[in-house]
């Protein structure tokens, strides 16, 4: 008779990778940067390779309408989620909400945090209660009168709930109320959602990467985006044009050449924002500094791009000595650890 008490050896953990990739066709009537936030298949494959190299099983799961069925069939133990979702300001929450419904653990922040962070005005409102300094701003909704009073010019105009510099064209700076009105109207026409106008902070720009959880979250050395050219006269903006041809416009310095006190302040603020928004596993926070050395929070990305050698988060990790595959594994380990899964 078989020994019933003998434990069956478990196979390796099965990791699903959920993603949305850019598709070749460009829908007419959509903005040119319509698919900017989606990933390339190369990024998805790099993530898969990094996970497989650790001896884990993987299954690739495109986040389209087949996803619920595929998740039921494949039954991953955990999902490495980079899916952006589609449609509306809660799009990044779609996959996490589905995974929670099916009780499948996943890496990264939950749906509430992703919604909150994608809505820039909402996150600024929340962070104001934590006294995190952020540029003065105003939100304009489609169909509502554009009241421009109360802002100091110049202001930058950007969609309230986009990422990857979507909706930040070379014409994004308003110097007066008439220009602001025009830019807001154009932005609403192209992107449909709320528009954020923010006082422009002229100084240096930094981005800070975080990895891990809770009070012990690790913070990479801040990276500076150093401008040496700009498609916008007199303004340095890390916009779509710049990101598409970054070697022409910027270089990256990590660690940033800054006094220790400034580095400490960036790290402190990045952690504060991460914890205030309930982020998990990884995130990247953008800051700008004014002429007086004051730091302003610009936005947080709890689902930062992971394109090897291109996206800012893996780039700054690499500057700090962490290769792409180790970064991916560290994010996975952070998520697995929270879920009590031994990898
Ligand atoms: N208030 C601001 N002052 C100065 N620069 C800004 C401001 N808001 C945005 N920017 C510039 O625009 C870039 C993109 O804005 P951001 O809010 O980070 O949008 P995205 O989600 O597309 O990255 C920033 O990296 C920065 O260069
Ligand atoms: Mg940004």
Image (tube, rainbow, N blue to C red):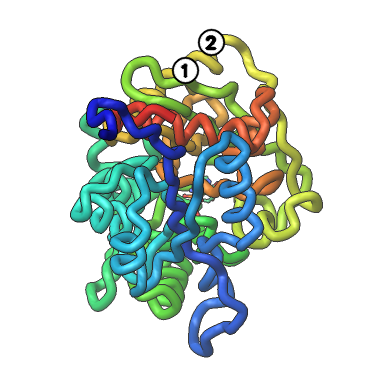
Q: Circle 2 — which element?
A: helix
Report if residue 132 is visible in the image.
no
Q: Quadrant of the C terminus?
A: top left
Numbered label attached to residue 265: 1
Marks 1 and 2 in Cβ contact (< 8 Å): yes
Report if residue 33 is visible in the image.
yes
The residue that appears at 50% across and 35% down in the rendered structure is 287
Q: Does the residue labelled 1 lie within 8 Å of ligand 1?
A: no
Q: In this view, does 133 lie to the left or right of 244?
A: left
Within 10 Å of the Cα at label 2, are there few (<14), some (14-19), or many (20+) other Cα atoms?
few
Numbered label attached to residue 261: 2
Q: In this view, does 48 lie to the left or right of 13?
A: right
Q: Distance between the residues labelled 1 and 2?
A: 6 Å
Residue 155: x and y in percent read 46, 53
Task: Name the quadrant containing residue 10.
Answer: top left
Look at the picture and state if 338 lies above or below 34: above
């Amino acid at each position: 008779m078989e020994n019933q008490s003998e434990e069956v050896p478990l196979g390796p953990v099965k990791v699903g990778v959920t993603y949305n990739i850019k598709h070749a066709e460009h829908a007419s009537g959509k903005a040119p940067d319509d698919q900017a936030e989606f990933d390339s298949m190369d990024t998805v494959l790099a993530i898969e390779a990094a996970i497989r190299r650790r001896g884990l099983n993987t299954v690739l799961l495109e986040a389209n309408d087949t996803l619920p069925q595929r998740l039921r069939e494949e039954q991953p133990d955990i999902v490495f989620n980079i899916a952006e979702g589609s449609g509306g300001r809660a799009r990044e929450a779609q996959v996490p909400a589905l995974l929670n419904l099916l009780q499948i653990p996943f890496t990264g922040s939950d749906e509430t945090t992703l919604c909150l962070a994608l809505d820039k005005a909402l996150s600024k409102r929340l962070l104001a209660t934590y006294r995190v300094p952020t540029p003065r701003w105003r939100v304009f909704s489609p169909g509502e009168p554009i009241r421009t009073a109360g802002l100091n010019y110049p202001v930058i105009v950007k969609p309230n709930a986009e990422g990857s510099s979507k909706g930040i064209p070379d014409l994004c700076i308003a110097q007066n109320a008439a220009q602001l009105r025009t830019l807001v109207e154009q932005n609403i026409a192209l992107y449909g959602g709320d528009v954020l106008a923010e006082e422009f902070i002229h100084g240096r720009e930094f981005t800070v990467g975080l990895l891990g959880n809770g009070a012990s979250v690790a913070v990479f050395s801040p990276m500076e985006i150093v401008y040496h050219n700009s498609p916008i006269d007199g303004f340095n903006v890390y916009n779509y044009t710049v990101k598409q041809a970054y070697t022409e416009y910027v270089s990256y310095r990590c660690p940033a050449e800054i006094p220790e006190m400034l580095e400490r302040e960036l790290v402190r603020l990045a952690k504060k924002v991460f914890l205030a928004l309930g982020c998990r596993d990884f995130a990247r926070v953008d800051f700008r500094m004014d002429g007086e050395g004051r730091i302003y929070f610009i936005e947080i990305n709890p689902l930062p791009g992971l394109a090897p050698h291109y996206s800012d988060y893996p780039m700054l990790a690499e500057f700090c000595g962490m290769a792409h595959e180790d970064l991916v594994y560290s994010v996975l380990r952070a998520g697995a650890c929270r879920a009590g899964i031994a990898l």
